[in-house]
Amino acid sequence: MNDTSAPIGVFDSGLGGLTVLKEIITLMPAEHTVYFGDTGRTPYGSKSPETIIKYALQIARFLQSQHIKMLVIACNTASARAYKAVCDLMKIPVVEVITPGAQAAVQGTINRKIGVIGTRATIESDVYVNAIRHFAGPDMQIIQQACPLFVSLAEEGWWHHAVTRSIADVYLQALKQAQVDTLVLGCTHYPLLKDVIAQSAGSDVTLVDAAHRVSERVLDVLKTHRLMNQSDVQGHHVFYTSDSIEYFQKLGSLFMDRTIDTVERIDIEQY
Amino acid sequence: MNDTSAPIGVFDSGLGGLTVLKEIITLMPAEHTVYFGDTGRTPYGSKSPETIIKYALQIARFLQSQHIKMLVIACNTASARAYKAVCDLMKIPVVEVITPGAQAAVQGTINRKIGVIGTRATIESDVYVNAIRHFAGPDMQIIQQACPLFVSLAEEGWWHHAVTRSIADVYLQALKQAQVDTLVLGCTHYPLLKDVIAQSAGSDVTLVDAAHRVSERVLDVLKTHRLMNQSDVQGHHVFYTSDSIEYFQKLGSLFMDRTIDTVERIDIEQY
């Protein structure tokens, strides 16, 4: 398949992946996109590898039925657990969100001490440790911390709440003691809590939000495969969810920082 | 069907319903039970009514296939959203967890000011307000508060954490200002946070944990329908989950305060 006018498929366990979609649209305004958010089964972060793989394959099959030219797994947990399984299924390029963040962290650190925060599933998978070692060799210090409450806090809208700061202080304590100078936000929800995480981490620590890096990777892959949409017209953007349309529109518009008009609900368990 | 030796079916969106199962086993040790925890799709509290009904019906069909004599919806969110749909499906008695808690609150309050806390779905459904009004008439004051982060905190194991106390203080502020003397824990996860909630609510407030009341209701219904197991032998207890067996065993044993040996994983989406 080599249809340059086909859409890019993007999915996440919920709304967090919209922070990645936003960067893709900004960088490649002519591209059409199809987004699926699995709000009916969110969050993935505390679920088992087998369940995450099963859900990711259902979504990949659904997006395949939408004739996408490329797939972006805009969810760190699904990237960590299901990237290989999804690649085995798909005949089109698949981009995950781990590698761009790991690469940015390696380029950014000066004292060679990198912190990584994410869901329990992402941290337990060691996927960031392996990706960082790939770019940096074994002398790089990597300190990981699972932050299971951050997704709930992001979805509760407590983005600047004092309680969020207290929780961040608990989670980031070991990373601060280890004096990391670079902190990877290893979950697409975390950019929403960026202000609080930055305050808690302190001004010596640079946060790595991989969303923009992922969009650059998408552009590279499109170019390599000669799949870029050369149109001068702005692309259109379609959204699907496995739960409430109203919830997706309301919170999704906040995540995207633009109004989401057309959302359709689908029965993902059928795929 | 009138097989007294058949098991009682119990389900929850995850592990919270085990606090109800524990009371049922204590009160009726001869009864066999089958428990299903939907950990693969938990939590239900922020999902839409349609999604919660769909999930509850799948679980009811699965438990029906296990030849249960009675069904307990040990989840406030599913009780609030899906009780009627489940009753329409089943030919056996169905018990939900709202009514026993509402009744206990009405019996317990002296100043006729009752607080109710629960998930967003439970609170938005107004199911507790309606149930309390049914027993108490329109002069009873009822103040509700959704506490979406409590389920995550319970599952994170932060049952006595200072942060949990801070969050409880935020959530309970309006209830304290309204001077409720009785507070319904309208979610089967909340008993795990009981100490912190009690401290935050203050010593003038009585907490209503409906789990024991629900078990009394189950006993009543079994008696009425002549479905009691008259055996002298202890019942056996079977557990099913839609996600990791290890997670269910580990955390479930804490919830039940006894070791859970045999858990089986099933594909609930097939039902």
Image: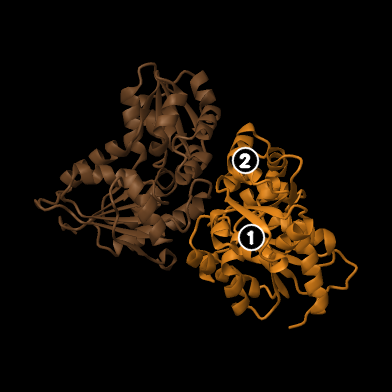
Chain colours: A orange, B brown
Q: Is residue A25 left or right of residue A148?
A: right
- Using the image as rendered, state which of residue B114 and residue A14 is in the foreground: A14
Residue at the far bottom: name it. A1
Residues at badges 1 and 2 in contact (C-beta under 8 Å)? no
| Quadrant of residue A202 within the rendered picture | top right
| Quadrant of residue B32 within the rendered picture | bottom left
- Using the image as rendered, state which of residue A12 and residue A237 is in the foreground: A12
Kindly tell me whether residue A178 is visible in this rendering: yes
Question: Compared with residue A106, is residue A247 higher up or lower down, i.e. above or below?
Answer: above
Q: Residue at x 48, y 45 (%)?
A: B156
Residue A91 numbered mark, or none: none
- Using the image as rendered, state which of residue A59 and residue B250 is in the foreground: B250
- Near mark 1 (Cα within 10 A), the count class, few <14, some 14-19 or many ≥20, is many
Check disc 1 and report the residue beneath it. A75
Q: Secondary structure at mark 1?
A: loop
Q: Residue at x 33, y 50 (%)?
A: B253
Three-letter residue code for mark 2: Ala
Residue A168 numbered mark, or none: 2
- The image quadrant where one finds the N terminus of chain A is bottom right
Q: Residue at x 68, y 36 (%)?
A: A160
Residue A258, percent from left and from top: 77, 50
Give the letter of the chain under mark 1.
Answer: A
Kindly tell me whether residue A241 is visible in this rendering: no
Give the letter of the chain under mark 2.
Answer: A
